Amino acid sequence: MKRTIILLSFSIYFLVQTSVYGQDTYVPTDNNLEAREWFQDAKFGLFVHWGVYSVMAGGGDLGIAEWIMHRKEIPVSQYEMLPSFFNPTQFDPAEWVSMVKDAGMKYITITSKHHDGFAMYDSDISDYNVVDATPYGKDILGALKEECDKQGIKLFFYYSQLDWHHTDYYPRGRTGNATGRVESGDWDAYIDYMNTQLSELLTKYGDIGGIWFDGMWDRPDAPWRLEETYALIHELQDQALVGSNHHKMPFEGEDFQMFERDLPGANTMGFNEAGIGALPLEMCETMNGSWGYNIKDREFKSTKRLLHTLIKAAGMNTNFLMNTGPMPNGKIQPANVQTMKEMGEWMRTYGESIYGTRGGPVEEQSWGVSTQKENKIYLHILNQEETDILVPVDSKMVKKATEFSSGKKLKFKKTRDGIYLLIPENEEDIDYIIILEMK
Ligand code: GLC
C-alpha cells in the first residue's frame, strides 16, 4: 500500500513536472505549428490599447496615455475613481471588426489588462474590471470576441505582467512606485493571481489567437515562473501563440518574437538589442506617437509611411501590428479610421504580394524589399529615385519579369551579380511592384 502511494505520488509529480513545468523542453503541437503558419500568412493586425486611462486622454501632455498613472504619480486610491467615469456607450464591436476587415487586417490584439492593473473583461478573481467597476458594466473583450468569431478575425490578448495596482506585486520594479501601496506583498500570490486571470482569458472566450505579454522589463530578474505560465497557456489552448515584449531573444515556451516600434534588426528605440531568432516575427507600431488615446497627439503617420512599414516588415518575414487607442466613448479616432480605410484599399489591390508570402530572397536594398510565394518573387520598389536597379538573385533561375499592376513584361539583363532592371515610368506612388517568375 505504502509503495503504491509512493509510486502514485511519484507519477503525479512527474506528470505535473512534464505537463505544467515542462516548457524547458517545449515541443509545440501540430495545432500550434499550424497557427504559426496562419500567423505568418496573415501579416497585418490591429493593436488596441484601451482602458480606463482613455478617460484622461493623456491629461494634456504629449507622450502620455496608458502610462498616466505612473507618469503623474496618481495614487491607487485616486486612480480607482477612473472606472466610475468609464462608460463607452458608443462602443460597437461590429463596427470595429468591420473596420479591421476592410483595412485588410486578419487579427486584433487588445489589452486585457495593462500596467494599471484594470481588467477589460469579466474577471472573477478581482472586481477591478470593466463589468464590476464601471457604469458601462459590459464585458468588452467578450463582446469583441463574439464579433470577431462572426466575421472571421482572430483575437489575441495583450496582458501586462507588470501591475501598478496589485499590492502583491512586490518587491516592485522600476515603475509604479508612487502609487501609494503598502511596502509589503507576496510575489508568489501575485503570480498565482496573474495565472488565474490568464486561465480566465483562456477558458471564457473560446479559442483565441494567443497571449501578448508585456512588462517583464519592469523586473527582468524577478521569479516570474514563466515556464509554469507558458505551460498553463499551452495546456488550456495548445494553438494559442505566446509572445512577450521583453526585448530579449525568445524564451523557451514562446511561439513568436516581437519587436516594439522597430523593424527586426533596427534599434532606433534603444531597447531593441535582441537578435532575430527563428520563430515567427511581429513588429508593433503606433499610428501617431501614443498607444492609448491622447487628445493632443495629432502627429499621425501618413498612409504611405505606414504601408511602407508594413511592406518592409513583410520583406523581413515580419507581421505588422498597427496600433490604435480608442476614445473613452468607444469610438476609434476618425484620423485612424481614415488611414485604415486607405490602407485597406491598397491591400485589396496589392495584397497578393503580401499575404501568404515570406521574406524574399533579396535582402533590404536601397530601392526596397522583396517577398516571395511559391515560384514568384515580388520586388517592392519603395524608393523610385533609383531608376535602374540590380536585383541580387540567381539570374539563371529568372524566367520572366512583369509589372504587377498591368501584367506587362519587363526587359532585364542577366549578369553574374543578379538581374539588372530598368524601372519604367509609372504612376505608383506607394510601391511599384515587379513579379519575377522563377524556374
Ligand atoms: C511598452 C509600453 C506599453 C505599450 C507597449 C506596446 O512596453 O510600456 O505602454 O503597451 O510598449 O508595445
Image (cartoon, rainbow, N blue to C red):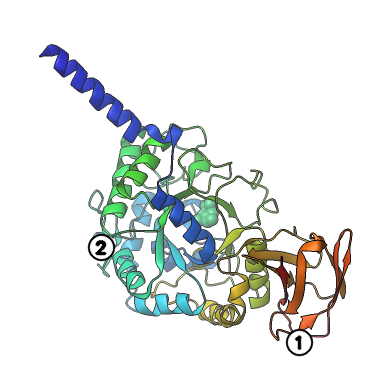
Quarter holding residue 373: bottom right
Residue located 31% across and 53% down the image? 202
Residue 327 or 393: which is nearer the viewer? 393
Using residue 126 as the reference point, say whether residue 171 is left or right of it: right
Using residue 49 as the reference point, say whether residue 297 is left or right of it: right
Pick the quarter of the image with the N terminus: top left
Which residue in the structure is indicated by mark 2? 131
Residue 349 or 378: which is nearer the viewer? 378
- On the image, the x and y values in percent for residue 232 come to 33, 42
Three-letter code for the amino acid on which mark 1 is drawn: Glu
Callout 2 environment at 10 Å: few (<14), some (14 to 19), or many (20+)? some
Q: Residue 427 — which label?
A: 1
Q: Distance from label 2 to label 1 (Cα)?
A: 51 Å
Residue located 54% across and 42% down the image? 250
Residue 279 or 83: which is nearer the viewer? 279
Looking at the image, the residue that sits furthest to the top is 2
Pick the quarter of the image with the C terminus: bottom right
- On the image, the x and y values in percent for residue 64 come to 54, 60
Q: Earlier in the sequence, mark 2 or mark 1?
A: 2
- On the image, the x and y values in percent for residue 219 come to 50, 37
Q: Is residue 213 above or below residue 22?
A: below
Q: Residue 116 — which label?
A: none
Q: Is residue 361 above or below residue 175?
A: below
Whether residue 185 appears in this view of the structure is: no
- On the image, the x and y values in percent for residue 58 come to 51, 65
Single out the mark in the foreground, 2 or 1. Answer: 1
Residue 257 or 280: which is nearer the viewer? 280
Three-letter code for the amino acid on which mark 2 is drawn: Val
Judged from the image, the secondary structure of the residue bearing numbered disc 1 is: loop
Residue located 67% across and 76% down the image? 304
Whether residue 318 appears in this view of the structure is: yes
